[in-house]
Image (cartoon, helix red, strand yellow):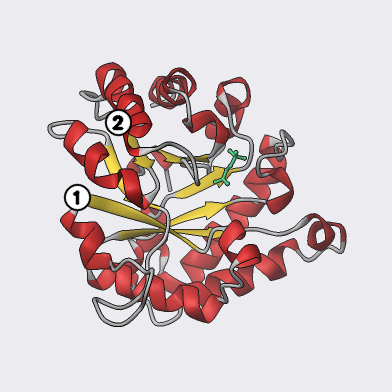
Amino acid sequence: MSKNIRRYLIAGNWKMNKTASEGTALVREIHHEIGHQSDVGAVVCPPFTALESCAKALEGSTVQLGAQNMYPKSEGAYTGEVSPLMLRSLFCTYVILGHSERREYFKESDAFINEKVVAALDSSLKPILCVGETLEQREADETTTVVETQLAGGLKGITADQAENVVIAYEPVWAIGTGKTATPDMAQEVHGFIRKWLEGNFGEAAASKMRILYGGSMKPANARDLLAKEDIDGGLIGGASLQAKSFVELVTIARSLV
Ligand code: PGA
């Protein structure tokens, strides 16, 4: 099945960076450069506090908005949390779920992440579900077992129709923010495994439409070789998404491969 049926997606994960005014300035620049193209998908995921001002700055733009997390209930006594409906009302289309930083620092389990995936889909938000192994797990040859467990846990109860709206991000934990990227071949090996797993669970038609992003020190210098791989459909970008120049360059590289 050809890769052409999937549109590349370049997603910026700003993490805990940028105030509302800094974020607005950044998205204005991004919009100015690539806000009218639709060859590839581009999405920025600011912190909650910058979502509203970024949404306003992106009115009429093809650049979409995502959040970095959410709580899997529509409302109620959950002090400090933010619901899928609140994100929808700020024009979010995507939500990053199960990032390794949340798994590690906030002890998020696959079962909890699964609740969020289900709640996001119920509210028409597209989950970007992150999976990936630590260095110890890779060295112990556990990469595929870990990834499979995270996929099975995170996507439990999801139908094939729903799965088409889920984006998977393969992010080897040892490559995040470290400057160490998986080689294109190493990444493709895991992406190929993920595609097969998706086929086995949701059927070939759904799996061929699902995007699998690579994340972990992706930047303009290494993006082309990664994005050229058969099962790499985009990137989840941390560090390089914090400056308009590098984020725009990544989108431009993806466009050149279409
Ligand atoms: P990085 O982060 O690009 O800074 O490695 C990626 C991520 O954590 O999503």
Up the image or down, 153 lies above or below 66; here it is below
Coordinates of residue 85 in the picture (x, y in percent): 21, 66
Up the image or down, 92 lies above or below 64; here it is below
Up the image or down, 8 lies above or below 208; here it is above
Residue at 36% x, 44% y is 6
Depth order, front residue of 214/237: 237
Question: Where in the image, quadrant-wise, is ligand 1 located?
Answer: top right
Q: Is residue 124 visible?
A: no
Q: Is residue 73 visible?
A: yes
Asked if residue 251 lies left or right of residue 85, the reply is right
Q: In the image, which disc is placed on residue 91?
A: 1
Mark 1 Cβ and ligand 1 under 8 Å apart:
no
Q: In the image, which disc is placed on residue 222?
A: none
Q: Residue furthest right?
A: 140
Coordinates of residue 105 in the picture (x, y in percent): 63, 64
Amino acid carrying label 1: it is: Phe
Residue at 51% x, 52% y is 169
Up the image or down, 223 lies above or below 106; here it is above
